[in-house]
Amino acid sequence: MKLPGYVQIEPVGQCNLRCQMCSIQFRQDGPPYGALAFMEFEKFTALIEQFGDVRELHMQGLGEPMMHPRFFDMVAYAVSKGIRVSTNSNLTLLNERRAERCVTSGLHSLHVSIDGASAETYERIRVRAHFERVVGNLERLLVTRRRLGSAHPGIELVVVIMRQNLAELPKLVRMAHHWSVEKMFVQH
């Protein structure tokens, strides 16, 4: 039997934010209810080995992947197997070291969640996040990518559209253009 060529794996089952539209806030399998909801590196590598024909891996679920201390090791491992890796992130945890790892790990594309073009709207939706920090982190990643002479990871913007941010969609499109974002997904 031929196995799938595309697989999605959730390396982290928890998040540092409490976004209005996300059900992760109701999970009780990570702190403060239980142990960290991080996939073990060995479990990840075993899964990759089981999917011998996989060519694309999307590392995402409800959690924030950059919370995992070995997230970039996972990316590099999959890339070493010839797999094209993508992920989603709220980008709140990006720092200089993680920006470099985004590039050097071989990450192919990064889907960045930004649900508002203003701090007021964004922070109302993405509870615990700071708009200026996320925008600064995205720009940090773009600078790091240029400094290291890489086109990867490609940046894709993800917007969850709702009544409270619909009016900001044109400005979000302009922002995406300013950042030379490759794709923009708008979902309900």
Image: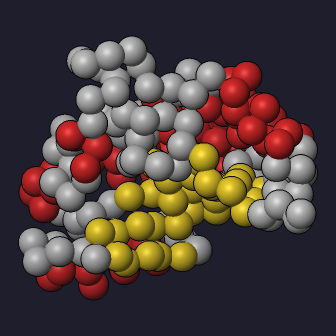
Query: Count the marks: how many?
Result: 0
Percent from the top left, x then y, of residue 111?
A: 51, 59
Farthest-out residue, front = 1
Whole-percent x and y of residue 63?
41, 41
For residue 150, above or below residue 64: below
Specify how the rendered protein is coloured: secondary structure
Tell me if I can see residue 151 in this picture: no
Residue at 83% of width from left, 60% of height from top? 3
Task: From this view, report whether residue 115 is shown above or below residue 20.
Answer: below
Q: Is residue 164 above or below residue 93?
A: below
At which x and y percent is residue 9?
60, 46
Can residue 167 be spotted in the picture?
Answer: yes
> Would residue 133 appear left or right of 7 to someone viewing this image?
left
Residue 1: % across, % down:
89, 63
> Left or right of 50: which side holds 132?
left
Quick check: 92 left or right of 106?
Answer: left
In the figure, residue 4 lies in which quadrant? bottom right
Q: Residue drawn 52% across and 49% down?
A: 60
**Camera-side residue: 1 or 90?**
1
Quarter of the C terminus within the rendering: bottom left
Viewer-nearest residue: 6 or 170:
6
- Say above or below: 56 vs 92: below
Q: What residue lies at 10% left-to-right and 54% top-to-bottom?
A: 124
Position of 9 compared to 46: left or right? left
